Image (spheres, helix red, strand yellow):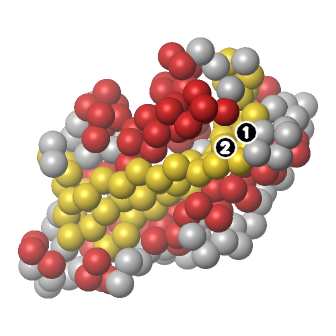
């Protein structure tokens, strides 16, 4: 059965595919389309709302069951920021280096016990017949005082999880505890109810 992953982020595509393919799906992505996916304005106020917007755009473009993720980092000291604006925290979209620098600047002088944070991944799945659902995964930890490692993407080099800095762990280790890994395991359970 074909499933479309509605993302332009190649790192997210790889992470989602790594978990969906063993579930028996034939993954379709933007590269399989005749024309590129249109950019979707993320006008939602929650991760779930933005994920649904992206999944619906994927369904409209392909006619296939479509899955989309909206994820980000929420820092308690910053009142939950950058939150849904994580990818564009520094102004541009998807500049991991500038986003990480801005976050470190915002937390300058803040002690470790006040640097608590959590990653959120909301995954939406929409069906051609109008059914839809979302699942949510979270990964809690702290923000480091500087970047470590070059594994993962986004804020991973700053995020200290239960297994250490995500910038230093393998993809397989990360999948076991990450927000997206947790959300995808919930997605698998929910998909079985719908299919």
Q: Quadrant of the C terminus?
A: top right
User: Which residue is rendered at x = 90% and y = 31% of the image?
Assistant: 34
Q: Quadrant of the N terminus?
A: top right
- Mark-to-mark CA distance, 1 and 2: 6 Å
Q: Is residue 116 above or below residue 147?
A: below
User: Percent x, y for residue 93?
Assistant: 59, 64
Is disc 1 in contact with disc 2, using a CB cutoff of under 8 Å?
yes
Crowd band around label 2 with a 10 angstrom C-alpha radius: few (<14), some (14–19), many (20+): many
The location of residue 103, given as percent across then percent down, is 33, 73
Image position, residue 113 (x, y; %): 9, 74
Most foreground residue, 145 or 74: 74
At 78% across and 57% down in the image, what residue appears? 39
Q: Is residue 106 left or right of residue 112?
A: right
State the mark number for residue 119.
none
Residue density around tag 1, few if under 14, some if 14–19, many if 20 or more, within 10 Å = many
Quadrant in the rendering for residue 131? top right
Residue drawn where x is 31% and y is 73% of the image: 75
Q: Is residue 5 left or right of residue 62?
A: left
Furthest toward the front, the residue is 193
Q: Is residue 108 left or right of residue 68?
A: left
Which residue is labeled 2 in the image? Answer: 125
User: Which numbered disc flags the more N-terminal residue, 1 or 2?
Assistant: 1
Helix, strand or loop at label 2? It is strand
Q: Which residue position is annotated with label 1? A: 66
Residue 101: % across, % down: 34, 70
**Residue 162 in view, yes or no:** yes
Q: Residue at x 88, y 45 (%)?
A: 60
Numbered disc 1: secondary structure: strand
């Amino acid at each position: 059965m074909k499933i479309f992953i509605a993302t332009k982020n190649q790192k997210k595509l790889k992470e989602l595919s790594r978990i969906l393919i063993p579930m028996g799906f034939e993954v379709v992505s933007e590269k399989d389309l005749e024309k590129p996916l249109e950019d979707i304005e993320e006008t939602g106020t929650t991760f779930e709302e933005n994920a649904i917007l992206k999944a619906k755009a994927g369904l409209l473009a392909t006619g296939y069951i479509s899955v989309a993720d909206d994820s980000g980092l929420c820092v308690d000291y910053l009142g939950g920021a950058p939150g849904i604006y994580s990818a564009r925290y520094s102004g541009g979209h998807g500049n991991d280096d500038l986003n990480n620098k801005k976050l470190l600047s915002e937390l300058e002088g803040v002690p470790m016990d006040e640097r608590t944070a959590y990653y959120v991944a909301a995954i939406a799945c929409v069906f051609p017949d109008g059914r839809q659902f979302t699942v949510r995964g979270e990964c809690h930890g702290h923000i480091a005082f500087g970047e470590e490692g070059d594994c993962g993407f986004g804020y991973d080099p700053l995020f200290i999880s239960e297994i250490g800095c995500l910038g230093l762990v393998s993809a397989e280790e990360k999948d076991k505890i990450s927000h997206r890994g947790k959300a995808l395991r919930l997605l698998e359970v929910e998909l079985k109810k719908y299919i």
